[in-house]
Image (cartoon, coloured by chain):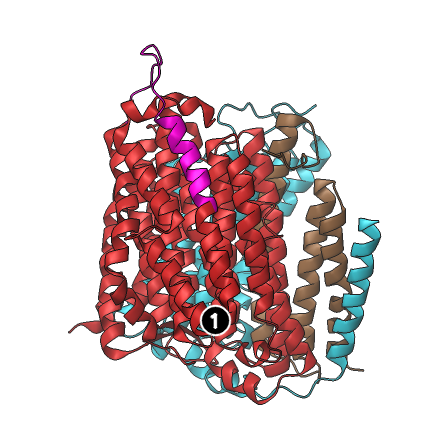
Chain colours: A red, B brown, C cyan
Amino acid sequence: MTEALLDPLPGLILLPLAWGIAAFLLGPGRGAAPAIVTLSLQFLFCLQLTHQVLADGPATHPVGGWGAPLGIDLMADGLATAMLLLTQAVALPLAVYARAYFRPGAPEARHFWPLFGLLLAGLNGLFLSADLFNVYVTLELVGLAAVGLVAMGGGAGQIAAALRYLFATLLGSGAYLLGVALIYGSYGSVSITTLEPLVAAHAPTLVGLAGGLMLLGLMLKTALFPFHFWLPPAHGGAAAPVSALLSALVVKASFYLILRLWLGPLAPLSALHPLLPWLPALLGTAAIFWGSWKAIRALRLKMMIAYSTVAQLGYLFLIFPLLGALGGLQAGIMQAFAHGLAKAAMFAAAGVLIKATGQDTIAGLAGAAQKLPLTLFAFGLAGVTLMGLPPSAGFLAKWQLIEAALGQDCWLIALVALAGGLLAAVYVFRVLRQAFLLTAPESSLQPVPRSLEWAAFALASASVLLGLRGVELMQLLHVGWAG
Amino acid sequence: MSTGLLFALVGAALFPMGVAGLLVQRHLLRRILAFNLMGSGAFLILVGLAQRQDVADPVPQAMVLTGIVVAVAATALALALTRRLYALTGRLELPDVEHD
Amino acid sequence: MKKIAIQLAALVFALVLGSAMLDLDPAPVDLRPAVAAHLEASGVAHPVTAVLLNYRGYDTLLEVAVLLLALFAILAVIPDSQTGRPTPAAPVLQTLARLAVPLMLVTATFLLWAGAFRPGGAFQAGSVLAAALVLLHLTGLLAGWPQPGARLRWGLAAGFLVFLAVAAALLLQGHLLQYPPAWAGLLILCIEFALTLSLGLLLAGLFLFLSRDTEGAP
């Protein structure tokens, strides 16, 4: 087998870089077709990688042929492969959606495709990197691409949201970079594999500081309560395909890094005090209640969905006290999948509704269900996943979380997970109730391309159907699990 | 004390100054300057701490060069957005977060 | 109140960080011997350039992508219909600029060539090139740039494209960016040459694309 030619690790980074640049060279507003074709190829690469990882264990690729610590290693274990799968699975339908969403020649979409391509390259690079400094570069790639996408519309509100987001993301990556600097100073290496035994053997105060800085910086980038202030204006104000990308994928990237550090090089530090893992869980709990409350009170549809993201990110942090067993990690990643697919679907559906009704308030949705049944169905399915009803992936995630929590006598976490599901039901039904109101026939809706509706529906059904195929995903996470 | 360690200590002073500036200042240009102060602090620590025995180490030097280019890119984007905001609203401060 | 609390916290943090730096053992890993040992095979004689373009060349590839990204984001927010404000011509400055620019081109070429064995390289050379363009603009000899046409787009992307193409081509015979020692010097020189041109345009672009955006400003 011509393995070098088909090695998915470098391929998943080179391909999006290539189509991003190709889109720029083709000119403003162009590049949708190469993006969709190449994204399909990336998705196939991901499937190939999944088979490879399941069969042979973690895959590595030493860039430059040097190997760590001199060179940079790419590494794909079960966790990284799962995140790669989620990324391509969300990006491909969203690319189809975005192609129909931005009308040709729209000034606000001139540079969407190049920014999208480089964003994906950054995400894939981040998931694959086994080098803390290289991770910093990919973090900046992701952060700046996301800011550019938010600012793309060019309106005053969007520019202000983008600037607020930019300062937050720069502060976060600055703290992360300082952590990397302290770690290099202490150990002389930034390779994750080289560092793991070194930190376990000896960790001076400086490394504790470094770990704290990196985790705090990444929490800011993940918009964990109380660092969520930048997320609602950025995610709620951007164009629908952008909001979907940001909520589904970008915030998950920094969460993945927190997990990677927590389970990897920082594991000896996080085990220092038994109460330490409860800190992220506590913030996560606060995020669930605060985000849900704001979502229930929101007047604008996209603001409601953005605050729901704040709440749903909270679940991801509930798993930290449970990470002693694989079940905790499985619950977290299942939640990342469920939320990623469902939130992308929800923002996509919201984009259709906003295009059709011409405005963004929940009150203005009255009668939408009669005219756009498919979109409302997609919205409802995504809602089912967010609430955690069977057979959705959200149900599976909550089930695993509660099982892991009860197995380790953390019934408080189980209670929070249940309460969060009920709160999600309140804000989802608020939208559905309004949309199913019967209105007088004079309320006119603009026609929208069918492919928009179908892309939203595909994402929503994926978020539900994944609940039936969750076992394979869970198996994937066994690969490379050290605990 | 070695020169490298002195660099690192100066970095340790600059970084928190930059962070505080980023959090306290409202004027966007000041915040952009504060971000650069913060970045410079981190770069000084990256190079200085690794060379605290005063033997040159090319690896952190190359990393800092990469970091500087990234910081230039981020600064350029921040300045462009600031100009745009100024052109659109005539203000050089971010509006308060809307409570929706 | 909040301001004082933040400043106090920053002070405390600086003191804690500084004191933690003072009692630090020597690092257990030392990459210097490895950097020196493979310098022969890296294709360049200067260790920092070897790290930048060979050992950790992947970082540099992504770093150029970050610069391009910043440019894309800037192009995405500046409005389409702008009329460049003509810079008033100052004859003395223009003459000086006409004299300085050729010298800057020579300096950039020297920096590019020097990078192989002493401090210098594509980024330094590119910055000088960009500075020359900005100087021409500020003295009124070069207009601000509108949204780039096809030729300028290719120029902006060329360095990254060459880098990406080399990285991908080397993948066929081993690993990403794994230079064969015999070809390393030549390949790195090609990359650096293309990068210098593109970085000059990119860095100048960060300035020149914005200079037409004066709409609404008093």
| Mark 1 residue element | helix
Determine the residue positioned at 45% across, 83% down: C40
Q: Pick whichever, A45 or A307, lies toward us.
A: A307
Please tell me whether residue A440 belongs to the stretch shown in magenta.
yes
Looking at the rendering, which quadrant does residue C11 occupy?
A: bottom right
Q: Amino acid at mark 1?
A: Leu
Q: Pick whichever, A352 or A461, lies toward us.
A: A461
Q: Quadrant of the C terminus of chain A?
A: bottom left
- Residue A254: in sight, yes or no? no
Q: Quadrant of the N terminus of chain A?
A: bottom left
The image position of residue A240, as x and y in percent, is 41, 36
Crowd tier of the residue under label 1, counting other residues whose Cα lies within 10 Å: few below 14, some 14–19, many 20 or above: many
Determine the residue positioned at 72% across, 50% down: B23
The image position of residue A150, as x and y in percent, is 50, 40
The image position of residue A418, as x and y in percent, is 45, 55
* Left or right: residue A16 compared with residue C34: left
Please tell me whether residue A432 belongs to the stretch shown in magenta.
yes
User: Callout 1: residue from which chain?
Assistant: A
Q: Residue tagged by mark 1?
A: A322
- Residue A163: in sight, yes or no? yes
* Left or right: residue A283 compared with residue A30: right
The answer to whether A345 is drawn above or below residue A126 in the figure is: above
Q: Pick whichever, C113 or A59, lies toward us.
A: A59
The image position of residue C28, as x and y in percent, is 59, 88
Counting every numbered tag in the picture gives 1
The extreme top residue here reads A442
* Left or right: residue A1 compared with residue B44: left
Looking at the rendering, which quadrant does residue A126 occupy?
A: bottom left
- The magenta segment is A423-448
Determine the residue positioned at 26% across, 33% down: A374
The extreme left residue here reads A1
Looking at the rendering, which quadrant does residue A98 occupy?
A: top left
